[in-house]
Image: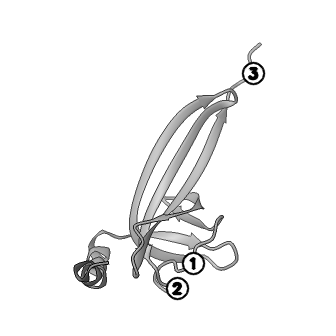
Amino acid sequence: MSTFSEQFAALGAPVLDGHLAEAVTYTPRSGAARSVSGHVVETDAYTDDVTGKVHESTLTLHVARDASTGIDSPAVADAVTYGGVAYAYTGERSAVSPTHWTLHFRRRVTERHAPQG
């Protein structure tokens, strides 16, 4: 990481967090739920399969790598709740820096087709 990147991560990210961050509830597999703040992006995809219409939502959360104000060691099946909807951690992470990272969460709902006959 360049000196500029390190300085921006240390100084810029907290300022952006103060203006753009949203609260989510983080629930580790083995632990108590708590509120954390980060940058949230939701995307939705709809497909059809033989059992019904599949709605898959992805939530990416850019959050501090910190045990008290962010998420320091996520595990598969940890969850975040945002807007009343729960998403499970996929094990994927990106945009990793010493102070922040982006974690990927997903939820999948299938609306069953009614039996034909």
Q: Find disc 1 in the rendering and name its residue.
A: 73
Q: Secondary structure at mark 1?
A: loop
Q: Amino acid at mark 1?
A: Ser
The image shows residue 17 at horizontal and vertical percentages of 32, 75
Residue 44, position as x, y percentages in the image: 47, 44
In primary-sequence order, the first of circles 1 and 2 is: 2
Q: Nearer the viewer, residue 80 or 71?
A: 71
Question: What residue does disc 3 label?
Answer: 115
* Amino acid marked by disc 2: Ala
Of residues 103 and 4, the one nearer the viewer is 4
Between marks 2 and 3 in the image, the one whose residue lies nearer the viewer: 2
Name above or below for residue 79 compared with residue 70: above
Residue 85 versus residue 117 in the image, above or below: below
> Given the image, on which type of amino acid does mark 3 rest?
Pro
Mark 3 crowdedness (10 Å alpha carbons): few <14, some 14-19, many ≥20: few
Q: Earlier in the sequence, mark 2 or mark 3?
A: 2
Identified at 48% across, 68% down, the residue is 24
Alpha carbons under labels 1 and 2: distance apart: 8 Å
Name the spot of residue 4 as percent of width and height, x first: 22, 80
- Which mark, by number, is residue 2? none
Residue at the image position 52 percent from the left and 48 percent from the top: 57
Quadrant position of the C terminus in the picture: top right
Give the alpha-carbon distance from disc 3 to disc 1, as whole Å: 44 Å
CB of mark 1 within 8 Å of CB of mark 2? yes
- Label for residue 67? 2
Q: Is residue 13 left or right of residue 115?
A: left
